[in-house]
Amino acid sequence: MYVKSGTTTIKMTARRWALIGATLAGVFAAGIVAASPKIETWTTANGARVYFVPAPELPIVDVRVVFDAGSAKDAGKDGVAQLTNGLLGEGAGELNADQIAERFEGLGAQFGGDAQRDMAIVSLRSLTEPSLLAPALATLATVLTQPTFPADAFERERTRTLVALRSQEESPEDIASKAFFAALYPGHPYGTPPLGSEASIKALSRDDLVNFYQRYYVARNATLAIVGAVDRAAAEKIAEQVAGQLPAGQAAAIVPAAPLPAEAKLTRLDYPSGQTHILLGQPGVTRDDPDYFPLYVGNHILGGSGLVSRISDEVREKRGLSYSSYSYFVPMRAAGPFTAGLQTRNDQADQALTVLQDVMKEFIAKGPKDAELTAAKKNITGGFALRLDSNSKIVENLAMIGFYQLPLDYLDTFNKRIEAVTAAQIRDAFQRRIHPQRMVTVIVGGAAAKPAP
Amino acid sequence: MRNLKTLMLLCLLFPLNSLAQSGGAVHEYRLDNGMKVIVKEDHRSPVLVSQVWYKVGSSYEHDGITGISHALEHMMFKGTKNYGPNEFSRIIAENGGRENAFTSRDYTAYFQQLEKSRLEISFKLEADRMRHLLLKPEEFAKEVKVVMEERRMRTDDSPQALTYEQFNAVAYLNSPYRIPVIGWMGDLENLRADDLKRWYGLWYAPNNAVLVVAGDVDPQQVLALAKKHFGPLKPSKLEPLKQRQEIPQVGTRRLTVKAPAELPYLMMGYKAPPRTANPDEWEPYALEVLAGILDGGSSARFAKHLVRDTQIAAQAGAGYDLDSRDQSLFIIDGTPSQGHDIAELEQALREQVKRVRDELASEDELKRVKAQVIASDVYQLDSVFYQAMKIGSLESMGLSWKIGEQYLERVKAVTAEQVREVARKYLVDDGLTVAVLDPQPIDEERARRMQQGQQGGGNHVR
């Protein structure tokens, strides 16, 4: 956590899932013991599913509209999902980009958008004061339902995307992540970068965005999450106002299953950095995976609990090899990645990789110790309230539950399901599902230490 | 720009500094040993955050021991007389907690986020490590390697971070603000456990600490627990810090940073005053509004004119650090768009600076900036952690948390004339430092380093 403009550094891991999977809102799934919010849900006349939790304490409303329109829907036009999402605020109805920005910001409203692999998100935070909320919602509705994709804004944002792509090329971490997904998901929609590539971005046309928008930004492909100081009747009006004018359309086709690689793959990329970045993994779990809970608790012990995890203990605490070493699952529509990783001084890369592999193999072979399992359960269940302690976190969880159509009691039963996990289940689940001999390994960096062959 | 990483990102979230007027009551106490205890109630959720702030950071350091405050922060997790290495983290985890720590120029802070019934375990452990840290040489030898990896990751392998680090070292001549928080690599190599012991002895004492607790708590119970655990700790005789105030800048400074990179990057920093306790002072608030007019969102001038209209910038930002012990900086930064270079970007940014010096901001612009500040003031209440953070950071810089309470009213009172006046007074060439990241071809650098690798040399950090 940087507190100020790079003047602050912290001790613990830069949690990579926050960078890669934050919008999936559930690398660490959520729940609560007693104070679990009561979720109300309904469907708008045109078919959008709505999830609502009242939060009367602060005069704020959060609206999060999620479409099944992430980069998994790019279909050969890599980058179209993100660019479509990014263009919504660049012109809509009678408004140009300046006017849209002025409207939201003049009201103190915060408008945002993002598209990762599964979800495309459009979000609004506003005060509940009617003279502020009403026009903010009206502008949101215009942006969502009448975007104009102006030709000049398209050209500009396309150019800025090319700049963003070059910025990724100067980050060994980004280079590694891109190579990792490509190796993990060959031929699968998750394998391509959400930002696209230079060639794919240059090949896009404005029509591609319009077509993408028309196909996917439709009511039956939308989930709305609403949290704030409004009652059910007001929330219903908000949902109608925001999404009521979307055409009904059709839900997107489900993304195909992601197969495991047949054999181990190694990608080694030289980069003139002082550190080597290592990623190791395979396709992991879906959101509704029956093994999710044993794998989640097991990973908490293996590499998901910061400094007290096994990976961190062996790599960082015992050997001082890395600042951030970890493993995590990102549950997605199709099997999202299981990833273990670290970064270390170039000449230590081989040693660190061996440690990482050994810890993983040992854990898969023997499973957790009883004391580790008890500690992990205490941490996960005892800290449950922290996962829902703000409107921001609640709205993210609501959108996640709605998008993946998890049961409405998901939060209520979460702790029970964690408690029910046994050491034998964890060992069994890891042995059936996690295969070190078929993993993808990506190594980026190391030019100084590892002369090219 | 959502995908273009910029170092200044957090700094540029304009309303970050504003402090909520509303929200729960704040209670302030002082223990007999001099430790300050501040409690902010927020009963929305059954959780709390507990933070211990020490008045020490990289601006307390001197050449040769840079990074020692941050290294000590790491060592605070490595064991006391009563708890082994990493046991602190294990106990907090078993209590369902999340914990971490952070170091800045002006403070070092430790925190735990917990369910509301678990406050005492936090106090027990924090009180223990405030006075009983072991600092074993063998633990330090491992941990300083972790810190060096952190430095490589955050700074050495990040061209923009590297530029920012060297920019600071040039913008400040004699102020310790020239020191990077993480420390120079050479100094890290020379640090020893004994150095940290001395540093710990100087600063880690109840009379140099502020305890902040926010959340679903009863202030009287918090105070009682604080007395029980922190009360018995002996205060230290604190040596007054020798002030090293930055000398006046008397001319533009320029530097170039060459690093393997794809994109050029420009930083321009003007010396500007920080907020103080003076109730009549308005300039820092006018500088905040100025930053908002330039870069307070998508409707602000940089996004409108530089990114959308002329398209000279792929990204451009402005930010002002309201709170610091020494001189602050008003920083403008940017990345040129394709087909434009650093010189064109600098000229475009300078034209924007000239405009705020020459012309009054419009009423609409002023209103928009203030509307965002007013709304953010409420939005911030959604985070218990952030509420505690604002109190702790002000207190550890020697300012009362109460100054933060005035933020909203002070910003609302800023006039267009005042914005122009601070622009004229502070956005001047004589107080300006300009840093340019000059990207070196990554492929050539790769080849060069490979050759060095084959010759078996070329890595001074090992």
Image (cartoon, coloured by chain):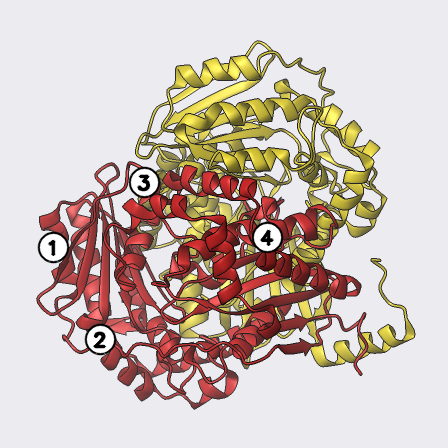
Chain colours: A red, B yellow
Label 4 residue SS: loop
User: Can you identify the residue that label 4 sits on?
Assistant: B428
Tag in front: 4 or 3: 3
Q: Tag 3: residue type?
A: Val
Callout 3: residue from which chain? B
Marks 4 and 3, the one that precedes in the sequence = 3
* Number of marks drawn: 4
State the residue in front, A240 or A13: A13
Front label number (3 vs 1): 1
Q: Residue at x 66, y 14 (%)?
A: B235
Q: Quadrant of the C terminus of chain A?
A: bottom right
Report the residue marked by disc 1.
A236
Are tags 1 and 4 found on a single chain?
no
Three-letter amino acid code at the position of disc 1? Glu
| Image coords of residue B309 (percent x, y) | 40, 73
Q: Is residue B235 visible?
A: yes
Separation (CA) of disc 2 from disc 4: 57 Å
- Which label number is shown at residue B378? 3
Q: Nearer the viewer, mark 2 or mark 3?
A: 2
Disc 2, SS: loop
Mark 3 lies on a secondary structure that is helix
Q: Which residue is mark 2?
A: A251
Image coords of residue A272 (percent x, y)? 73, 72
Instruction: Place residue A138 in its image quadrant.
Output: bottom left
Work out how far the residue at label 2 is from the one at label 3, CA to CA, in angstroms.
37 Å
Instruction: Give the chain of mark 1.
Output: A
Q: Amino acid at mark 4?
A: Val
Locate residue B212 relative to residue A61 in the image: left or right.
right
